[in-house]
């Protein structure tokens, strides 16, 4: 059996360490990192994500500010709220839960967030800084994947990573981060020919397509490390089940290590959101960012790239 990369356990340990760093920041500098989350509409999955983020921020000792707006909100109203949060000194990180209703431009909303409060790392300034290898706030899910890989494998240099998916929130930023770690990176998408043969060349295979169970065991190089980002709700025997983009049963016969769904990338993504909020708070107050958080949490050599 392959090693199971247990994102749930690692995320719990990271959040505990973050909680200790937050206490230290408050005692020594009088700073409480603040996370503002904006939810538009009543999508049940988004409501669960927002609740989890707010709860975990509070458990880590951070201040949490939640704004819920009706689905019919105008672009001007949403931008006005973001402006207010940009100015609010208690708020160090702003997250707008996606997707947004069609009358609102996602691109304009992302651009309205002050880059130093952009804890999702989606602002074009942060995207550019990351792509050019400069310090920046880094999108949470790609950061979660990278940290899980470094925890599992240590040094990533020279490994061939195949990333399935080229979205702005997962595939592309993850490819940038892996390049920075000196991986050889191939990004595949819906127009890629012969996906299976490409996947079989990967030392590291990351699936982020939103296609339930597409990656099967015979697509995987024996011993490869597989990170399954996909979160898909499938109906089965009258109830809904969460599955990834990887067919876990067949993939786990071949992979060297693999993340489960649920319990892999998902919990680490929220922990990375809190990590980014702590980074943002430290930077905004000119306080050095603690650089040993991961090694203290996990007792290994993984370092934060943010
Ligand atoms: P998008 O729909 O934005 O992007 C999907 C990508 O996958 C696209 O680049 C698309 O190609 C590619 N793709 C789709 N079908 C295929 C196929 N059959 N073969 C090859 N490539 C394909 O999705 P996201 O990036 O937002 O999310 C991907 C998955 O990750 C979803 O299941 C989502 O729920 C999950 N997710 C999980 C998170 C977590 O915390 N664990 C956070 C964010 C997302 P093309 O560009 O050509 O259309």
Image (cartoon, rainbow, N blue to C red):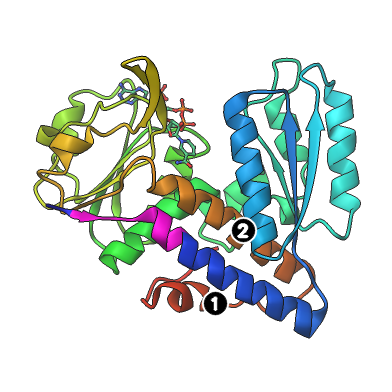
Crowding around mark 1 (Cα neighbors within 10 Å: few <14, some 14 to 19, many 20+) is: few
Q: In this view, does 275 lie to the left or right of 64?
A: left
Q: Is residue 298 above or below residue 8?
A: below
Label 1 residue near ligand 1, CB within 8 Å:
no
Residue 173 rendering spot, x and y as whole percentages: 48, 45
Which disc is residue 291 wearing? Answer: 1
Q: What residue is shown at x 37% (from left), y 48% (from top)?
A: 264
Q: What residue is shown at x 47% (from left), y 53% (from top)?
A: 268
Query: Badge 2 is on which residue?
Result: 274
Is residue 168 covered in magenta?
A: no
214 or 130: which is nearer to us?
A: 214
Say which element carries label 2.
helix
- Furthest-front residue in this view: 238
Crowding around mark 2 (Cα neighbors within 10 Å: few <14, some 14 to 19, many 20+) is: many
What's drawn in magenta, residue-wise?
A: 3-11
Q: In this view, does 257 lie above or below 61?
A: above
Q: Is residue 19 visible?
A: yes
Q: Distance between the residues labelled 1 and 2?
A: 15 Å
């Amino acid at each position: 059996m392959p090693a199971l990369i247990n994102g749930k356990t690692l995320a719990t340990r990271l959040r505990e360490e973050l909680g200790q760093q937050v206490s230290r920041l408050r005692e020594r500098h009088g700073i409480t990192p603040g996370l503002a989350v904006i939810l538009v509409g009543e999508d049940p999955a988004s409501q669960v994500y927002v609740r989890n983020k707010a709860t975990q921020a509070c458990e880590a000792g951070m201040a949490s500010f939640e704004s819920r707006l009706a689905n019919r909100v105008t672009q001007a109203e949403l931008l006005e709220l973001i402006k207010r949060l940009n100015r609010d000194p208690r708020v160090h990180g702003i997250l707008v839960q996606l997707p947004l209703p069609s009358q609102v431009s996602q691109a304009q909303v992302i651009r309205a967030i002050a880059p130093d409060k952009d804890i999702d790392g989606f602002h074009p300034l942060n995207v550019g800084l990351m792509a050019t290898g400069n310090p920046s706030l880094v999108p949470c899910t790609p950061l979660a994947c990278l940290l899980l890989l470094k925890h599992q494998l240590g040094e990533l240099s020279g490994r061939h990573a195949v990333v399935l998916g080229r979205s702005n929130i997962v595939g592309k930023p993850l490819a940038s981060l892996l390049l920075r770690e000196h991986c050889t990176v191939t990004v595949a998408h819906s127009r890629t020919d012969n996906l299976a043969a490409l996947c079989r060349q990967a030392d590291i295979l990351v699936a982020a397509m939103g296609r339930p169970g597409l990656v099967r065991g015979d697509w995987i190089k024996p011993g490869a490390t597989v990170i399954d980002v996909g979160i898909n709700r499938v109906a089965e025997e009258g109830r809904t089940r969460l599955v990834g983009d990887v067919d876990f049963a067949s993939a786990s016969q071949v992979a060297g290590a693999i993340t489960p769904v649920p319990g892999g990338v998902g919990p680490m993504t929220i922990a990375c959101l809190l990590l980014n909020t702590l980074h943002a708070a430290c930077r905004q107050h000119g306080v050095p960012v603690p650089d040993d958080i991961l090694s203290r949490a996990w007792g290994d050599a993984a370092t934060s790239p943010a």
